[in-house]
Amino acid sequence: MPAEMRGTMAYLRQDYLTDVLGTCLNQRLEELSQNPDCPFIGASADYGKYLISKTCDALEIDIVPKEGQSAAAMQAVYTEVARARDHGFTGTEIQRAKDEYLSQVEKIYDNRTKQKNSFYCPQYVRHFLEGDAIPDIETEYQILQAVSAQLPAEMFNMTFAEMAAQVDTNFVCLGLYPDKEGVSLPTREELQAAVILGFNAQTEAYVDEVNNDPLIAKLPKPVKVKKEEAADFGYTKWTLKNGANVYFKKTDFNDSQVIMTARSKGGNNKIATDNYVNASLFSSVMGQTGIGNFTGTELTKKLAGKQVSCNVNLGENTDVISGNSTPKDLRTLFEMTYLRFQEPSNDQAGYDNFMAMMRSQLANAEKNPMTAFSDSLMQTVYGHNPRRAGIHLADLDKVDYQAIRQICRERFQSAGDFDFYFTGAFDVDSLRTYVEQYIAPLKGLKKREDYTDLNIHPVSGKVENRFSRDMETPQAMIMVLWTGENPYTMKDDITVSALGTVLSERYLKSIREEGSMAYSVGAAGQTEYGLHDKYILQVYCPVQPAKMDDALALMQQGIEEIAKDGVTDEELNKFKEFELKEYADNQRSNNYWQGLLLAKNNWSKDEQTGYEDAIKNLSSQDIQNWVNNVLLKQFNRVIVTMLPNDFSEEGK
């Protein structure tokens, strides 16, 4: 579209058309990728700027082919493009995409009076640089509702036929491949032939297969809340007959948001080490496959027009269900939560596609020296404990989908073992109705599980691991980790955070600005509580190989200087100002309040009472004392460094 029209109604209309069409095509490509014979792992389409040009728009399709099947993947994708061009998208496909688009805009509209600066700034930047329209959300929502109602399916299909009109001119194909042995690169002629074959293919019309069953085939009989009482931080607690507890807090921080967390004691620590690779991929696999009687593809279609998600996860010592929705879609969130406690979906196609994607990612990652650095770091810090190892390509041969489903059955068999937390802009009467319909009837248990402590700790003392790898862009990498156990206090938590902030500023000056050793360097400190109270201070720096040892010396010097002289008033006040502002902002955050109650219920920690005073009263002496009496006294320091293979000390 000409630049002078970018701020007009015509541009809004075209943007809506192309977004809806992109959703339709992407859904077809996603569905096709689930076929085990499909030559690509994934593909996605978008209509927008032509590469880096601001003056020309183009249909762009990104393809991740299976190994050795680049030409076949290209042909398969452009056959789908030809199918849509020749036969159009079905009315149901277009309606789902329209519903999803308007649902996303409605979510913004409903929270229109409480948007933050981060919502507006990118729009102003695009308007200034590219002339994009920036109507207020009320006007935009009204316009899009009217446009959506007026545009028939034929208009969308005519537009797509124009978007995909030709490939013989104004067509560019770029291919990026890993530089490693055994990778066969397709020729220009092979790719060109594949595009033409696909684009000229004789196709049949697409059949939109939809699972129209309800998410829950038969609703359970509702069970009344057993008891209601006040809880901490303004929450209310409902006790259910199956043993579950429900905590809720109605807020007005975000009129489009309800967040949910359900948590029980358990997690990866309950999984045997020989089954740990399945536990490691549990969350990803469950997120990429279906739920209930719906495959992942069917679920995507079912949830079109709803802003809702609900996922399961295994922490180190907790089983977790996390979700969110708009107030309008809260019932759907409860339906999905209910299904997470039922027989897990057996979505073999979704699982196979996820594993193909993982194989491609890991095959490329193992060529990346940063993968070796990350692996070496974890292995060094945790003494080669197999439960702290990363996932590698060879590990995928040990993954078993049915074993992952069994983990789901075992860890999420009883809602009575869980506490449920709801925070946001819901109607309390509706929340009670949904709790009694979808959570209270779930299976209970006589006794809740407890935590399992496997006593996995970082190594103690001074440990160093220095190694080298082949690199296209030679640079050294440094990670210094200080760890240890120390009783948790709010004061120490703030102290360690301040230490990391001050060190980060000092290292930027000494290592980057004055020493010209690195483009970036950072430090961060935090304390943690749980089965063990502990702290961690980390320093990370990509550095010039010849100056790596000098940078390490400056890192240690920075800590010793604080141990001797503390920090300056300017450094301390800068930290306090930022923390107090963040604390004030958090008072209107649903996640903040829910996090407070989770900490109190699970670990008996109050992270709010006295927090402002603790920030204001923090002194240089506090930081100096902690460095001397904890950090340097325990002196548990791991240094992991990586150098390029072609670096030599003589060449320094």
Image: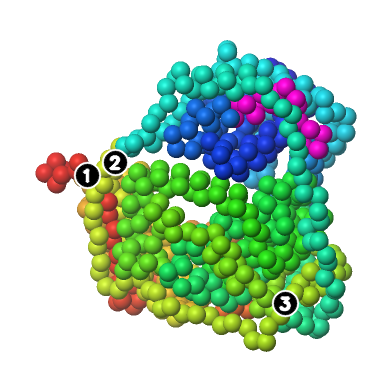
Secondary structure state at the residue bearing disc 2: loop
- Residue in the foreground of this view, choosing between 477 and 72: 72
Chain-order first, disc 2 or disc 3: 3
* Residue at position x 66%, y 59% in the image: 345
Name of the residue lying farthest toward the top: 169
Q: Earlier in the sequence, mark 1 or mark 3?
A: 3
Q: Amino acid at mark 2?
A: Met
Q: Position of residue 228 (x, y in %)?
A: 80, 81
- Which residue is under mark 3? 443
Question: CB under 8 Å between callouts 2 and 1?
Answer: yes
Task: Tell which circle, 2 or 1, labels the residue nearer the N-terminal end.
Answer: 2
Which residue matches tag 2? Answer: 471
Q: Quadrant of residue 4?
A: top right
Residue at image position (43%, 55%) is 397
Q: Which mark is residue 645?
A: 1
Placement of the C terminus among the 4 image quadrants: top left
What amino acid type should be assigned to the residue bearing mark 3? Lys
